[in-house]
Amino acid sequence: MTQLASAKFWVPLLLITCLTMTQPLLADENYELIDWVDLMPDDDLEALMNPPEYLDEIEDGSMEDQISSQLLGALENSADDRYQQALTSAKVKPEYDQRPIRLPGFIVPVEMNEEQLVTEFFLVPFFGACIHYPPPPPNQIIYVTSKEGVAQQNLYDPYWVEGTLTTTITENEVAVSAYSMAADNIELYEEE
């Protein structure tokens, strides 16, 4: 093989190899890094940031602070209490429908495959969400599916999840989510 023929073979092969190896690096630029509050409509966020006065009167750890008392209090207060509505809001931001995003969160497993990899889960903003009552609002929960699955070692480990977000409501015995995502990439969280 002559040097010219050899170069014609190796140059394209090296170019393809370089492009293939850098593709994961380029893929990260295709996802918009967002925060959890970005998924919450402004009026819900405003309501949660300004809780009603009756909550200030409840002493931490008191009987009124118990879940059953909170539910009773919620029923006693007006059904149009914006704070209570925001706590259970499934309202979404339509501009995030079909948008590729990158978001950190905690995995609440829903389904595992035969290799014990988590293939369906809820992504939530804080550890223990959905396990402890009350869960976050549905617009703060994302139902995620993953073809490859993820080997979750610890429930308290946060993950970065990348994929295309949709505004689809999913409900099961664990939680209700106002967003869904088919994950393209899942990795342990590291500060960026």
Image (cartoon, rainbow, N blue to C red):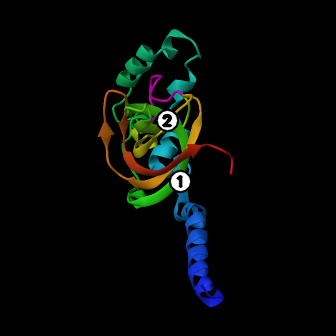
Q: Is residue 108 above or below residue 29?
A: above
Secondary element at image label 2: strand
Residue at x 58% of width, y 37% of height: 158
Query: Residue 113 colored magenta?
Result: no
- The 10 Å Cα crowd at callout 2, few under 14, some 14 to 19, many 20 or more, is many
x and y, in percent, of residue 192 in the image: 68, 51
166 displayed left or right of 192: left
Q: Give 38 or 12, whichever is nearer the viewer.
A: 12
Image quadrant occupied by the N terminus: bottom right
Return the residue at label 2. 107
Q: Is residue 25 above or below residue 165?
A: below
- Left or right, 170 with respect to 11, comes to left
Circles 1 and 2 in contact, beta carbons < 8 Å: no
Q: Residue under circle 1?
A: 102
Q: Is residue 148 above or below residue 137?
A: below
Q: Residue 60 falls in which quadrant of the image?
A: top right
Local SS, label 1: strand
Amino acid carrying label 1: it is Arg
Q: Which residues lie in the magenta part?
A: 128-137
Tell me what residue is drawn at x 36 percent, y 22 percent. Answer: 76
